Image (spheres, rainbow, N blue to C red):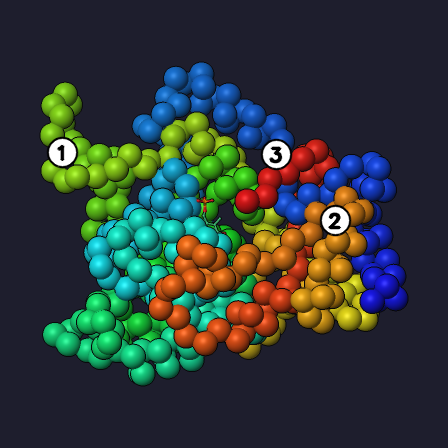
Amino acid sequence: MSDRLADTQTLIDFIRDTYAVPSAEAGLIPLHAPCFDDTEKHMVSDCIDSTFVSSVGQYVNRFEEAMADFTGAKHAVAVVNGTMGLFLAMKVVGVQPGDLVLTQSLTFVATPNAIKLCGAEPVLLDVSRKTMGLCPDSLANFLAEQTHLENGQCLHTETGRRIAACVPMHTLGFPCEIDRLVDICREHHIKLVEDAAESLGSEYRGRHTGTFGEVGVFSFNGNKILTTGGGGMLVTDDTELAAHAKHLSTTAKVPHAWHFEHDEVAYNLRMPNLNAALGVAQMQKLPAFRQQKRALAERYRTIIEKTPGLAFFDDANNDHAAASNYWLNAVLCDGAAHREAFLAFTNEQNIQTRPLWTPMHKLEIYQACLQTELPNTEWLADRVVNLPSGIPCQGAAKGGVTS
Ligand SMILES: *Cc1c(COP(=O)(O)O)cnc(C)c1O
């Protein structure tokens, strides 16, 4: 084992060099710190000067337009964070208390949490080893073996519960095989909500992730490719869904110059203008961020290919259909023991590396969920380690945010 760790010296040197932190004593190299300059300061300051810092203001509209433009979606609705974005997306596609919602066990806890917030129950499916995203075969097999169609609805045969939606996630920015998932969901009358929280800037067959399902949801948490401090965005081509999401996010207030009429029990989930100002500034840099991240991934690949015991996780695994934003670069270790040794070795040197999330079926809060066999989930969770992946800039050496 120690020989193998010694073999990683070129990789360690490369990371130190990239982030200009020459030694462990010189400071922490965070997993993913945000990157700001005067553009952000000017826009946030302008927003403060305008006094429109709350849920109404031009920056919210501008940020929504920029996101619709960038992703190619017809509509975008800004919200307070990605988790509530997922909740709202499921609400507007019609997820009801008592429904089942299909998702992958290998995800951040926000995905099943948002399902639970709707009063629905997550069903945990397996991921594919080549994408780390929801495996189309796992989905198709579950539907074939455990469900049937009745009156145009997909029902779980044993419990009689309705399967209302499917929420695949584009893990670490690597697009899942979303076109196959779209076909399967359509065939079974299941709404598709994409958890695209990690995949802003990732495309599948030339089309932006988040735009394949009924609704896609992005996150702008501090550790994501683009940040608004905290924030999220729904994108959709469906004009009615977009209008309903916006309505539900603003207490379902019926527009009027002074009267307070509300026609649904609703929420306060709108993104504040102050956060949107940060978003508008960050959006201008997104194409450059994406390019820089893909260039960094290319350099990681070159080094990791020559490192014994480690394998680089590549978007070319996905039939060359995918173009990842490489939000977090990932290496595959030989197994759980090697993964632990590599995590300890790097973190002891003040280089922040992280394993994947504990799979949802291993958390006490979700272990009782309906689930299939999850061999690929466990295989990946035992092996993947994320490497520092922020845009190398001044801010990157100062701190950082990990969720
Ligand atoms: C970040 C993230 C979310 C939640 O986003 P927040 O803005 O932090 O609420 C949801 N799903 C996944 C997969 C994420 O990585």
Q: Residue at x 42, y 80 (%)?
A: 137
C-alpha distance separating marks 2 and 1: 52 Å
Residue 157: x and y in percent read 23, 77
- Residue at which label 1 appears: 262
Q: Nearer the viewer, residue 302 or 331?
A: 331
Give the mark nearest the N terminus, 2 or 1. 1
Q: Quadrant of the N terminus?
A: bottom right
- Residue at which label 2 appears: 347
Inspect the image, locate mark 1, and give the three-letter code of the amino acid beneath it: His
Give the mark nearest the N terminus, 3 or 2. 3
Corner quadrant of residue 53: top left
C-alpha distance separating marks 1 and 3: 39 Å
Eye-nearest disc, 2 or 1: 2
- Residue at which label 3 appears: 36
Circles 1 and 3, Cβ within 8 Å, touching? The answer is: no
Inspect the image, locate mark 3, and give the three-letter code of the amino acid beneath it: Phe
Q: How many marks?
A: 3
Could you tell me which secondary element the residue under label 3 belongs to? loop
Q: Nearer the viewer, residue 301 or 43?
A: 301
Could you tell me which secondary element the residue under label 1 belongs to? loop
Is 123 left or right of 293, judged from the image as shown? left
